[in-house]
Amino acid sequence: MGLAYLDYNATAPVRAEAAGAVARALALGGNASSVHGAGRAARALLEDARETLASAVGARAQDIVFTSGATEALHRAVDAASGAFGDLILSSIEHDALWEGVKPTRTLACGADGVVSVEEAAKVLDGADRPLVALMLANNETGALQPVEAIAPLVRAAGGLLLVDAAQALGRVDIGLQRLDAAYLVVSSHKLGGPPGAGALALSPGAPFAISRRGGGQEQGRRPGTENVPALAGFAAALRSDFAAERVRIATLRDAFEAGLRRQFPDAVIFSDAASRLCNTTLFALPGLAAETSLIALDLKGVALSSGAACSSGKVRSSRVLAAMGVAPALARCALRASFGWASTKDDVARALEALETLRARRAAGRA
Ligand code: PLP
């Protein structure tokens, strides 16, 4: 029996269509800047990927800057806006990809539900100097959707620019750059079943773009370096999936998982369950069962979950997001994340619940 992989928010398995597109692009070869036939073929793939992504996020093709992923795109956005903002405002639940790399002058707190409120945004924006405001569309740990659309008018009224991290949202909710009124929007390929190492920064027309690094003139000089055409072709192939049907199927699996979890563990805490959440994410705690030991026990049973806050060293550390939500450290240490996706099945749900049942037995026997 294979692995029950429920860690799509870390990285989704690569879809067959995406893997096929990568392989075809690799076989084709060519540098998208070359004038010969191979170069023109690579260019055609690249521009096709650009059109596909532009239509997925409601941007113009010329406003898509391809990058190596969301981390690079987030930093490229902050660099692009340099000189155009005074205050840098981050929500306290932004991903480490940005949080660890910049120094905000103000922060937006979230409520106990893991959501940043419009009232909080109004308070923090009051008196801010041409702010650049980073607010993610969906949180990677809780899946909680943030009211970006409602907060955007306040950012605009403050003379600011909005930077939206949509790495976890792409494919899972509809995204419209204009509707969100975002100057900058960031996405990543490997969260939705494309290959890793590809992502993009989508710009609203006229968004400031200070060039910070010069090199070859690729991406209109906005991201010098030979484009990773195979990965981007794979990203585009993944983007052509039938997300609407997929969301319904995934939500059913996630809901079945949560129902089973509540049956087995009446004391289970599901974080952000009162908020609007992504259809695929459950962050939960089983009191008394530390995440670190639970993850190992689940892994031995062939079930891949995450602590929601695993760092790059693979260690489990306490979650900044749960701390921001005011969750007691003892409970936060028990947090586990199950995240579902395109290849998840009912069998995965059953296996995860079965594996969790053994944890319940250990806890009852005092061996947790
Ligand atoms: N932003 C969010 C919300 C994420 O979940 C991730 C994933 O780790 C990132 C940014 C970083 O993405 P990437 O791995 O493409 O750099």
Image: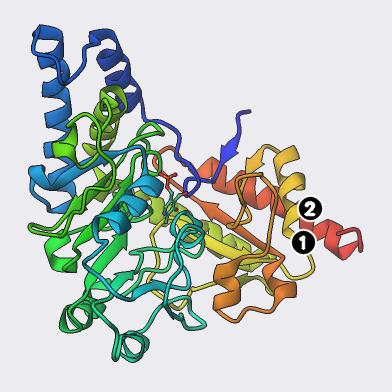
- How far across and down, in percent of the image, does residue 261 sit? 62, 62
Find numbered disc 1 in the image and state the secondary structure of the residue it sits on. Answer: loop
**Point 48% across, 62% down: residue:** 99
Q: Is residue 220 left or right of residue 17?
A: left
Q: Is residue 195 left or right of residue 290?
A: left
**Point 8% across, 57% down: residue:** 205
Dots 1, 2 in contact, CB < 8 A = yes
Find numbered disc 2 in the image and state the secondary structure of the residue it sits on. Answer: helix
- How far across and down, in percent of the image, does residue 190 sit? 40, 39
Q: Is residue 104 left or right of residue 118?
A: right
- Give the labeled residue for mark 1: 290
Disc 1/disc 2 C-alpha distance (Å): 6 Å
**Point 78% across, 63% down: residue:** 289
Which quadrant of the view contains residue 131? bottom left
**Point 71% across, 66% down: residue:** 333
Tag 1: residue type?
Ala
- How far across and down, in percent of the image, does residue 280 sit? 43, 55
| Vertical order, 205 against 215 (above or below) | below
**Quarter of the image containing the N terminus?**
top right
| Vertical order, 326 against 301 (above or below) | below
Which quadrant of the view contains residue 240? top left
Tag 2: residue type?
Thr
Q: Is mark 1 within 8 Å of ligand 1?
A: no
- How far across and down, in percent of the image, does residue 86 sit? 29, 75
In front of the other: 214 or 23? 214
- Give the labeled residue for mark 2: 293
Pointer 1 local density, CA inside 10 Å: few below 14, some 14–19, many at least 20: some
In front of the other: 272 or 236? 236
In front of the other: 299 or 244? 299
**Quarter of the image containing the C terminus?**
bottom right
Which quadrant of the view contains residue 121? bottom left
